[in-house]
Image (spheres, helix red, strand yellow):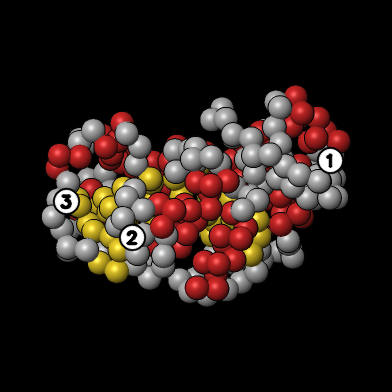
Amino acid sequence: MYSFLTDITAVAPEIYRNGWAEANAGNISLRLNKAELEDHAVFRETAPWRPLSVSVPEIAGEYFLVTASGCHLRRIADDPEHTCGVVRIGDDGESYQIVWGLQGGEPTSEFASHLLAHVVRRRVSGGEERAILHTHPTALIALCHVREFDTRSLTRLLWSMHQEGVCLFPGGVAYLPFQISGGDAIAEATCRAFETHGMVMWEYHGILASGTSLDHAFGMVQSAEKAALIYRDACCMGGMRRALDLESIRAVAENFHLAPAPDVLDEAPKSRQYQKISER
């Protein structure tokens, strides 16, 4: 197996087994690093160039592993050449070529949104973050149907369910009210949210996570979903009566030297320097 497929063939089936990728739901992109490009000799560097619908000069020349439009994540490990592929962004930042895989297919319909998100998170994280995962976690989506949320209230709820919450996703979860996916408006809103938060929740739809690897992004979603499940179970046991308070959450973050998402635990922080989220 090629080195650039190692993570996606391990993570994609887990997403399906968790029930977060029904039918052709969900999509993945990974900005490839030097180690993952060891097998670049198999790339078709003479492939035709295609126009991008967005301009991304900040990631010109970079290589991305992306899922195919309409692919089933559960099939990636068995048939990677049809369900995903490697694309190279042109030196002008306005074109791309398919250099491996995507046989008979196209990149995910959310390709432009993924690239714009990569631009933001690459800058915010100092180049550390390179994976974007979009999926449909059941309990997190269910929350949208029982309570009204904004970014602050959703993140506080999830962090208050389990001590590990603020440790495993200190970037919090930005909450975007319902919009039709695939359009420019939701892509722009998602990028604005990614300026300050590591995950973005699309109301009634699903979540996007940015991580240093696919394992990292998957773990963030898994942790947020676990918190939502704890909330659900507590409600089923008679209702929420106790939860971690803000002082306790703040103490946990300080103990692990983390800088939680701004405006969640305090009113108006003067500044926040990005702190790498450790893969714990």
- Tell me if I can see residue 235 in this picture: no
Q: Where is residue 91 in the image (x, y as percent from the top left)?
A: 31, 55
Q: Is mark 3 on a helix, strand or loop?
A: loop
User: Is 129 situated above or below 199?
Assistant: above
Tell me if label 1 and label 3 are in contact, CB under 8 Å. no
Task: Name the mark nearer the viewer: 1 or 3.
Answer: 3
How far is mark 1 from mark 3, CA to CA? 53 Å
Name the side, left or right, on which 74 lies relative to 250: left
Q: Which quarter of the figure is the N terminus placed in?
A: top left
Q: Which quarter of the figure is the C terminus placed in?
A: top right
User: Is 13 situated above or below 141?
Assistant: above
Say which residue label 1 marks.
Answer: 246
User: Is 53 situated above or below 263?
Assistant: below
Disc ID at residue 92: 2
How far is mark 2 from mark 1, CA to CA? 47 Å
How far is mark 3 from mark 2, CA to CA? 16 Å
Q: Position of residue 158 (x, y in %)?
A: 70, 46
Say which residue label 3 marks.
Answer: 45
Please report the residue visible at 70 percent of the width from the left and 26 percent of the height from the top: 256
Query: Disc 1 marks which amino acid?
Result: Leu
